[in-house]
Amino acid sequence: MPFYVSPEQQMKDKADYARKGIARGRSVVVLQFADGILFVADNPSRALHKISEIYDRIAFAAVGKYNEFENLRLGGVRYADVNGYQYDRRDVTARGLANVYAQSLGTIFTETNKPYEVELVVAEVGEDADTDQIYRLTFDGSVADEHGYVAMGGQAEAVAQALKDRFVEGAPLAEALRTAVGALEAQDSDRRLEAKSLEVAVLDRHREHRLFKRLPAARIQELLDAGQGAQGV
């Protein structure tokens, strides 16, 4: 006799499977600061990035299985390049990219036996904080429009609670970085994250042309050690 599983149970099993895979990964934090959007990942690897540039004003952060979110990242870069070339660079937006990712993830979740074990943030920096866009996408294609901060992967609830307690709107870069690192450390009271264990990048609205910049370990350490006045990238 064939083994029957109801559609509801099948979807629940897929969702549980994906959530467990994502929770095994190290956390990523995305938050707004005075000059743009800051991305901070607990990631000691210098080669395998969780944070990447997608287009002029758009960046991507992910947790979960590297090969799966790398495929999505590459697809997003191709989408942005083609649309920017065929139409106008201003037509490439985080909202459009989030919709493409949502369709892909939703199709994979419903039509394949194994869902992607990934969670994504697509962010676009605007002319000011009110026009910044941050979209969070889950393994089933759900999209959430976030404001202020986002935490993904690992013990995301603990990280999000720490961000809620510490986040200050319009904070300078150094303060925002310390907030993000403190939230990541909240998962384990005995752990202290060093600059070399962090992957940090920014979308800085005051730069020209390409607004994405990855921060080297020396600059990360400088910001962590700095006083409240440190603001530059």
Image (cartoon, rainbow, N blue to C red):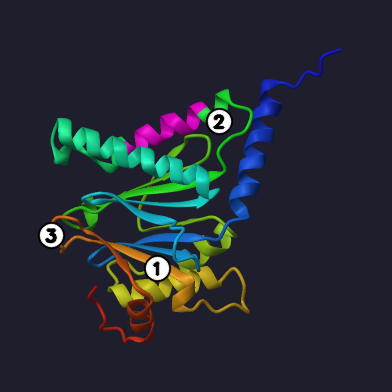
Q: Is residue 153 above or below residue 230?
A: above
CA separation in Å, label 2 and label 3: 39 Å
Residue sitting at 15 percent across and 40 percent down?
89
- Identify the amino acid type marked 2: Phe
**SS at circle 1:** loop
- Identify the amino acid type marked 1: Phe
Residue at the extreme front of the image, as rendered: 47
Q: Nearer the viewer, residue 1 or 159?
A: 1
Residue sitting at 61 percent across and 77 percent down?
189
- Identify the amino acid type marked 3: Glu
Q: Main secondary structure of the magenta part?
A: helix
User: How busy is the neighbourhood of tag 1: few (under 14 within 10 Å), some, or many (20 plus)?
Assistant: many
153 relative to 70 in the view: left or right: right
**Could one spot residue 121 in this view of the protein?**
yes
Q: Mark 3 highlights which residue?
A: 208
Q: Nearer the viewer, residue 9 or 219?
A: 219
Question: Residue 139 location, x and y as percent?
Answer: 53, 39
Q: Mark 2 highlights which residue?
A: 109
Q: In the rendered view of the protein, which quadrant contains the N terminus?
A: top right
Question: Residue 18 location, x and y as percent?
Answer: 61, 42
Question: Residue 44 location, x and y as percent?
Answer: 50, 69
199 relative to 23 in the view: left or right: left
Q: Mark 1 highlights which residue?
A: 167
Question: Residue 102 location, x and y as percent?
Answer: 42, 34
